[in-house]
Image (spheres, rainbow, N blue to C red):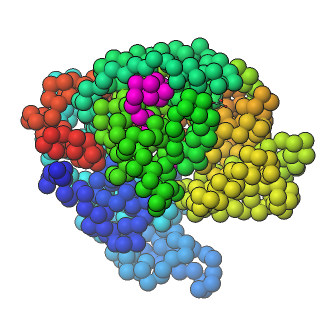
Amino acid sequence: MAALRPAALFPLFAKVTTLPGIGPRLGKLVTRIAGESVAGLLWHLPSALVDRRFSPKVGDAPPGKVATLIVEVLAHGPPPSKHSRAPYRVTCGDDTGKITLVFFHADGDYLERTLPVGEKRVISGKIELFDGKRQMTHPDHIGPLDKLDDIKRVEPVYPLTEGLSPKVLEKAIRAAVAKAPELPEWLDPAYQKRQGWQGWRAALGAAHAPASEADLSPLHPARARLAFDELLANQLTLGLVRAKARKRRGRSISGDGLLRAKAKAALSYTLTGAQTRALAEIFEDMASDNRMLRLLQGDVGSGKTVVALMAMLAAIEAGTQCALMAPTEILALQHFETLRPLAAAACVRIEVLTSRVKGAARAALIEDIAQGRVQITVGTHALIQKDVEFQDLGLAVVDEQHRFGVHQRLELAAKAAGADMLVMTATPIPRTLALTAYGDMDLSKLDEKPPGRMPVDTRLVSQERLDECIEGVERAIKKGARVYWVCPLVEESEVIDLAAAEERFLGLTMTLGEDAVALIHGKMKAADKDAAMERFSTGAAQVLVATTVIEVGVDVPEATVMIIEHAERFGLAQLHQLRGRIGRGGKSGTCLLMYAAPLTETAKARLSILRDTDDGFLIAEEDLRLRGSGEVLGTRQSGLPEFKLADIAVHGELVAAARDDAKLIIARDPELETERGQALRTLLYLFEQDEAVRTLRSG
Ligand code: ADP
Ligand code: MG
């Protein structure tokens, strides 16, 4: 059943190059800002405005203010020679005074055409005072008199990207907004009325046409409505996924405890109180005949893996199979290695399935899984390939859940059919954010760390002191330390990331020797990754230079030092995760957060939080609070949903309202068949939640 986007939305999902003035070259730039389709531009709201309505006589135009003037062009003053650095000046004026227009690197022909001597022109820009005379450098607008009304208005100012001019972008956005159709109202009428919100199209128009600073506030009704729409689409999607997942009845799974007892006996430690409590909640869910959908949230190092193992063993005792899905190959392999001896102690067969298992080996493994001969399959996305069928999957565990999108969660939910699901995350998500990412899954928390954790001494160091850091690393490895050196994510380009990491790798090998340093990054071949990890975990190499591939799950207890370059570019939660890699082996650790000076106040405050606390929840709350003040960093990398219109830090109440609304909708109209249901389908398409529509019977 193919999901069909309503025809009314077609113009919005055309390529940005269908907009006036946007060819292939500018299309690339616009795509960088707003994605490939016209719809993306609708969500690109103004960040400021320029009021050009002020239109005094030249003699009354006050310096420092933006004004729109009607002037006569009096004289042209080109620079004395072609190579002169002097600007091109055009003198204009009216009966009250004169003003000089100043152009650097000007095209004289062009200026003669647009500003012919003796004619009247409308100009708009900031009035400056130079040598006691009025001037305007590079007017924002120059036009004939009939353009006066076009120019004399409040102009929205949009966040730009390099190479894109404000005028071009504004024109494209105006055209995009003009393409927005009237759509059937999807809001609950009573709620809409209480909020005093306009219809979608009107709100969109208003959000793009601010008349005053107040209109730029995220709490302004037009913007709040659009934010709510986005949140409602998000909550509805999560709700539908959940409803689908629950549709199949679960089954009661409870084992005799024998396998669990064997594995427990093989552990070198006893479970923490938090682990025991979480397990009790999990076992209770599994034993009930409702399907389990539980989120296990625990800070880095809180010991989620063993909780997953115990849950899986319980499912195996009851005669079913289990799957453990991890976001990266490294992590899948690591889980496999960790769990193998414990599975062996319980006489349970465990296998690993990633994209590198190929050919005959893969075929044989898939056959064994299908025949129920493998009890635990650890893997990556490879686990949700079409040809992987379980004979009887009782429990699916998803680790580091935040790395997977709703899309993949849907696929696993489908594969797992009636199986219980346990998803694990180390991201200490603030409550409002948890709602947007997980809807209302049941929650177990590991709020206590295993004993023996050592504090990590965290320091902020300017990037200028790089040489000192390298010397420090040299001293540390002489004393036998193992060091992670993390290179930052630059923009979205992995290519640049790699260049940075490779350069640092070369630099470090020159100082520390070739054998001492290993390099690992996401683009490496699997075998090379293994080799690098192996050299580092055995101690053959003492320094591991890495991009953020080591962020999740990697466990080398001997590592005690971590250097993170350009820490200001990371999200706090991500830095916290990274830091969680050290201080594990009973030895205290050191973490140097390097930053490029100068740091803004907010950036400094953010990094200081990490220095001052090791409490993941506190860090996440603070991060959100500070990010609310404008510095948006790190959501992209965190894998949490990225909102274009909603800002979790200010729209917390709307999140809760959207959640309640979505719940009610799904309870009353689970297949979105009523009139409002149909409108809500349009909303889902509008926010590209086609996947969610596909879960519906008549999707
Ligand atoms: P995470 O929650 O980050 O996935 P892991 O499951 O990788 O954490 O556990 C981190 C480390 O703590 C592992 O080396 C694991 O063996 C150890 N560990 C887990 N539970 C306990 C416990 N109850 N007592 C001592 N060590 C534990
Ligand atoms: Mg883990």
Please say whether residue 320 is one of the residues in the magenta stretch: yes
Quadrant observed for ligand 1 in the rendered image: top right
Query: Does the image show residue 572?
Result: no
Which of 344/31 is in front?
A: 344
Image location of residue 510, percent across then percent down: 84, 62
Residue sitting at x 38%, y 55%: 34
Query: Does the image show residue 340?
Result: yes
When asked about the image quadrant of residue 315, the answer is top left
Please say whether residue 314 is one of the residues in the magenta stretch: yes
Residue sitting at x 30%, y 31%: 418
- Extent of the magenta region: 311-328
Which of 59/62 is in front?
A: 62
Image location of residue 358, percent across then percent down: 48, 59
Q: Is residue 8 left or right of residue 551?
A: left
When asked about the image quadrant of residue 431, the answer is top left
Which of 665/172 is in front?
A: 665
Vertical position of residue 689 compared to residue 364: above or below: above
Specify the farthest residue to the left. 675
Image location of residue 361, percent across then percent down: 49, 56
Vertical position of residue 329 compared to residue 282: above or below: below
Residue sitting at x 86%, y 56%: 512
Q: Is residue 466 left or right of residue 126?
A: right
Which of 91/617 is in front?
A: 617
Image location of residue 211, percent across then percent down: 32, 43
Q: Identify the image quadrant of the C terminus.
A: top left
Residue sitting at x 48%, y 37%: 376
Q: Tell how many labels.
A: 0
